[in-house]
């Protein structure tokens, strides 16, 4: 199977990493809209417009599926993408909601949702979880973590101060939804801050879990073909992909 | 006189604030490219393309002058903007370089230049200062400060940790160039960190100094007309303008 992975920038590579580890696809075409990143501070109409342009780009390939790695796009533009695409379009938000349900035993579990301003304002995770009868929800926009990851700062004093800034008033959660593709790179710092009882929900793993439940993957793809496209500076994207994915 | 002020987002409002304080213009037209902010992480060609689009936008008005408040644009696209505009185009970098010269007594003064990745990579400030025989230069890309200002975090533990992160290895400067329109909002924190001997060079004040030396402003404009345009969510820009500028 041939999949397109769309993200606003480089963050979606964390989803590609999960897809590679589970050897699901023969071909992965990645498109990062690096010229217009970040999407998380943009408004709904702009995000929808950019998302539909990405669908058009993917029409250059004969894809079996599009995965939307970007939480902000999944939250705002999934229906519009599904309408204009010729193949299934799967978003990390719906996958993350189901993974959260699978990770928790009790409906009164305390769930903390993190994301960009766009993702949190959309209430996409909250609405999804409420539909599954989870009610004990907290949501917090944490855009500084995006900047820290882009600076490749994953721990240390700034991360500590930022964790403190965002979370000192919040009760420690049973599950922490990393509702932005950048956040898995801070997973160790989140886990240390909240303690090992907190279950971290990672978009990449959630997507894999969702795909394996929904589609048939008869054979493991041990030597997938990978192509990386970017709307600006594709060489920089390929360098980061090499580093993060060991490809 | 009627001036257009161009910035990638909201940061250029710090320049408008200086223009208003000095009552130089009858009319100020501000354009923030909020749909595509930030520019500081984009490459040269993209910045030039966006800058020329801004010039085209300003052709809707009969302007006497365009001020480029964005350091990244001033560093990369000033010549291209000057070529396509029908009026003088003035950038904060050239003004900042001259203001630095005026603030310092000795050519061996230690100057620290801060900016986005784009501004620092351009070496625009360094080249300008070297042409004026300043040689004792340090330059540092500090993109996290942009994110902090956008979160309206101007002091406290995260700012302290970020100052420490960027500057613990650098010697304290005689002059600190705030080479990004966001940074004046952190001026107090910079001054406290480096001590009161360090002179802060602020783009807004530098532009005013430059304009007053270069052009005639025969009468004070006590009731200037202000118009704010944004490529996305102009209402949000106008709210911030109200707050920051008291207009």
Image (cartoon, coloured by chain):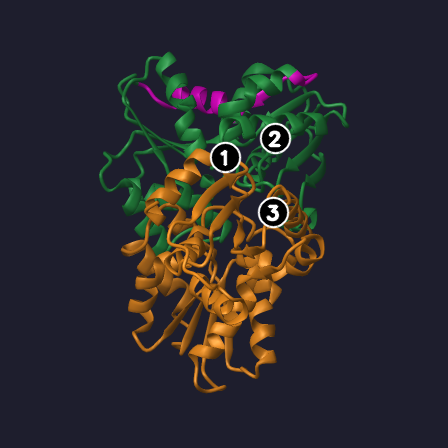
Chain colours: A green, B orange
**Relative side of A220 to A186, left or right:** right
Quickly name the residue at label 1: A42
Compared to residue B76, the image places residue A50 above or below, namely above
Quickly name the residue at label 3: B62
Which chain is mark 2 on?
A
User: Local crowd at mark 2 within 10 Å, few (<14), some, or many (≥20)?
Assistant: some
Which chain is mark 1 on?
A
Quickly name the residue at label 2: A50
Q: Who comes first in sequence, dot 2 or dot 1?
A: 1
**Relative side of B50 to B231, left or right:** right
Res. A100 image quadrant? top left
**Front position in the image: B167 or A53:** A53
Query: Which residues, given as a range, are shown in magenta?
Result: A84-105
| Residue at 56%, 76% in the rendered image | B129
User: Local crowd at mark 3 within 10 Å, few (<14), some, or many (≥20)?
Assistant: few
Specify whether disc 3 shares its chain with disc 1.
Answer: no
Q: Is residue B170 visible?
A: no
* A55 part of magenta stretch: no
Res. A216 image quadrant? top right
């Amino acid at each position: 199977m041939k999949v397109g992975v769309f993200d606003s920038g480089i963050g979606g590579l964390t989803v590609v990493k999960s897809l590679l580890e589970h050897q699901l696809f023969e071909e992965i075409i990645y498109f990062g809209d690096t010229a217009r990143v970040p999407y998380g501070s943009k408004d709904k109409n702009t995000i929808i417009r950019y998302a539909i342009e990405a669908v058009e780009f993917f029409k250059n390939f004969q894809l079996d599926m599009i995965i939307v790695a970007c939480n902000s796009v999944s939250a705002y533009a999934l229906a519009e993408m599904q309408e204009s695409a010729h193949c299934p379009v799967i978003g990390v938000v719906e996958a993350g909601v189901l993974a959260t349900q699978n990770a928790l035993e009790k409906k009164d579990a305390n769930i903390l949702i993190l994301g960009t301003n766009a993702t949190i304002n959309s209430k996409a995770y909250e609405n999804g979880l409420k539909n599954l009868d989870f009610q004990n929800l907290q949501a917090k926009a944490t855009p500084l973590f995006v900047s820290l990851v882009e600076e490749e700062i994953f721990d240390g004093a700034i991360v500590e101060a930022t964790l403190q800034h965002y979370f000192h008033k919040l009760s420690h959660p049973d599950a922490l939804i990393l509702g932005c593709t950048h956040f898995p790179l801070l997973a160790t710092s989140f886990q240390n801050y909240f303690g090992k009882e907190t279950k971290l929900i990672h978009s990449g793993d959630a997507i894999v879990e969702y795909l394996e439940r929904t589609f048939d993957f008869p054979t493991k793809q041990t030597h997938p073909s990978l192509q990386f496209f970017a709307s600006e500076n594709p060489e920089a994207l390929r360098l980061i992909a090499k580093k993060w994915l060991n490809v």
